[in-house]
Image (tube, rainbow, N blue to C red):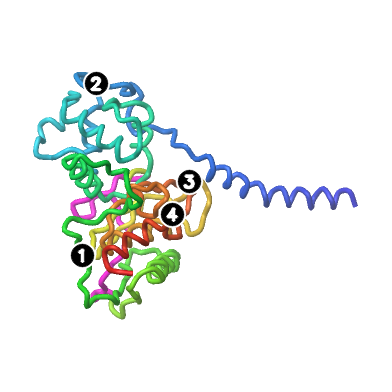
Amino acid sequence: MASKLCLQLFLLFAFITPHLTSARHLRNHKPSRLLFPEHLIGSRKNDNFEGIHKVKAYLQRYGYLSDEKENNLSTDAFDDDLESAIKSYQKVFKLNVSGVLDRETLQQMARPRCGVTDDFILVAQQDHENNNTNIEIGGSHYMFYPNKLKWPVEKRHLTYGFIHNYPPEHAAAVIRAFDTWEANTKFTFSHAARVQTADILLSFERGDHGDGKPFDGPGGALGHAFGAIDGRVHFDGDEQWETGSFWQEYFDVESVALHEIGHALGLGHSREPSAVMWANMDSGVTKTHLTIDDIEGIHALYGP
């Protein structure tokens, strides 16, 4: 009898432990790895350390540094442009705005994120600075593509299709993401009868896949989309993907799909960390419900 009770307790503990561990990860997740060498911590203007050019490449990739000065991007010189870019990055991600590569800034850069640039936010910040207003004042944090790029009024029913390389086990998660947007917008969605005619095309890609926005392997950019009318949505095939998983090392397909579909409808990155349209998505975390900011953003673009 005692041995049977011990076995039952062991099985119960074995079942509960992973869920407790997952919940702890969800509550206390803090990025610890660095994308760049430790010796860059504390770097500031006029420094010249090996590896600074990689920070420049990162900031250029996400819209903080212009590629017009290509020669400067390849050097390790910490110049005025880099300091300004770091300050802009720190503002967007609500860090201490110093222009210094402190540990918190480098940790933020190491967090997995969407591969779409943050240009929308930077333009809004510049507009507010030019008008001497504070971008943080007011309730809305959503952003749009330049010129409010969106689907024409006659296109309120959109079809989607999966390219041949899309893992079939993840299709249901993407359909749920479409259902979530449908429940909160004027759009309806359905699977295209022929993939060639789909308005939104979803695929898993690796590395340089021919769209000018190469993926960077595990971590880093998880996916990207090309905005309204274009309709391409790409997931990085080198990531560890799962559906509804809370395991720390996996990324949730539905959560990332919900974000990228938001781009495909015309939303940019939000300045609200809780929003689906916030740029970052950590492993072991799910975001499968739109926030008020997401809903207000899509309603501002297409109407309630």
Identify the residue position indicated by label 2 in the image: 49
Q: Earlier in the sequence, mark 1 or mark 2?
A: 2
> SS class of the residue under badge 1?
loop
Identify the residue position indicated by label 4 in the image: 241
Position of residue 258 measured from the top left corner of the image (x, y, whole percent): 38, 60
Q: Earlier in the sequence, mark 4 or mark 1?
A: 1
Q: Earlier in the sequence, mark 2 or mark 4?
A: 2
Quadrant position of residue 179: bottom left
Residue drawn at (29%, 45%), measured in percent from left and top? 216
Identify the residue position indicated by label 1 in the image: 230
Residue drawn at (39%, 55%), measured in percent from left and top? 276
Q: Are marks 2 and 4 in contact (CB under 8 Å)?
A: no
Examine the rendered structure and indicate whether residue 62 appears above or below residue 156.
Answer: above
Quadrant position of residue 289: bottom left
Circle 2: is it few (<14), some (14-19), or many (20+) Cα within 10 Å?
A: some
Identify the residue position indicated by label 3 in the image: 249
- The kind of residue tagged 4 is Trp
Mark in the foreground, 4 or 1: 1
- The kind of residue tagged 2 is Phe
Locate the C terminus and report the quarter of the image it occupies: bottom left
Alpha-carbon distance for marks 3 and 2?
A: 32 Å
Range of magenta residues: 195-218
Alpha-carbon distance for marks 4 and 3?
A: 9 Å
Q: Earlier in the sequence, mark 3 or mark 1?
A: 1
Q: Are marks 3 and 2 in contact (CB under 8 Å)?
A: no
Q: Earlier in the sequence, mark 3 or mark 2?
A: 2
Quadrant position of residue 252: bottom left
